[in-house]
Image (cartoon, helix red, strand yellow):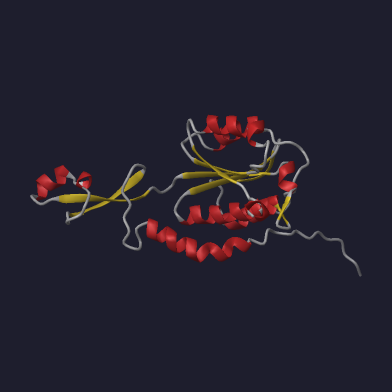
Amino acid sequence: MTLPGRLRVLPPFHSKRHLPSKLRKLRELDGKAAVQIRGAGTEFDSLRDYVRGDDVRSIDWRATARRTAVVVRTWRPERDRRVVIMLDTSRTAAARIDDEPRLDTGMEAALLLAVLAERGGDRVDFFAFDRRVRGRVDSAAKGNLLGSLVQAMAPLEAELIEMDWAQIPAQVRAISAHRSLVVLLTSLDSGAPEEGLIPLVAQLVRQHVVLLGSVRDPCWAE
């Protein structure tokens, strides 16, 4: 007897092998390995007594006056930041790099980054796009982020059409009105930046921090 059915192929997430080392580094940056980070964009953590070698800019003068002992502030990385990941599904995603479609490599990068950001306490949104949204995961949705991402990525294919970069700012605004880290996983092949990517980045950096991610053919480095 033959029964009709559908087979859903999920992204393999090979890059998960990098998770242990990346998570150890994340814990170090988060202060769990006795590492404190000070600087712009960090959150206040606690007060402690001053020791030789501390940055004098960390001294909390009000607390020092109350305690009659020099006290410094310690800092930790911000939490609950917004991370927006855009995966390019236009024609350039069909190119094969080292015998793997660029789209597959982009999905691996998106999965690894999303899991690390979530473990770091950040809110992660994802969308796949070319001229329209092909897949979306909302940070406000309840449930397992990794499971939601692989389900959203399963039906993705590279579309043989050009990317419409002009729509990206509106897509980002619809996801987050606040300052976010916007990660664009796309192609930086010759011609692509001039076709709209550079003007897009110039527009996004007015409000957001922008990171471009692109896979490169290892043969180019030879």
Q: Is residue 127 left or right of residue 48?
A: right
Residue 148 visible here: no
Please identify the residue farthest to the front as the structure is shown.
Answer: 222
Q: Position of residue 41 (x, y in %)?
A: 36, 42
Q: Position of residue 52 (x, y in %)?
A: 17, 56
Q: Position of residue 65 (x, y in %)?
A: 10, 45
Please identify the residue farthest to the bottom as the structure is shown.
Answer: 1
Q: Camera-side residue: 138 or 207?
A: 207
Q: Is residue 12 left or right of residue 175?
A: right
Residue that appears at 38% across and 60% down: 28
Residue that appears at 67% across and 62% down: 12
Q: Camera-side residue: 34 or 56?
A: 56
Q: Position of residue 68 (x, y in %)?
A: 8, 50
Q: Is residue 85 left or right of residue 66?
A: right
User: Looking at the rendering, in which quadrant would you find the N terminus?
Assistant: bottom right
Relative vertical location of residue 57 with respect to residue 2 in this rendering, above or below: above
Relative vertical location of residue 10 with respect to residue 196 in this rendering, above or below: below
On the image, which quarter does residue 62 sit in? top left
User: Looking at the rendering, in which quadrant would you find the C terminus?
Assistant: bottom right
Residue that appears at 64% across and 29% down: 166
Please identify the residue farthest to the right as the structure is shown.
Answer: 1
Relative vertical location of residue 52 with respect to residue 20 in this rendering, above or below: above
Number of numbered discs overlaid on the protein picture: 0
Residue 116 visible here: yes
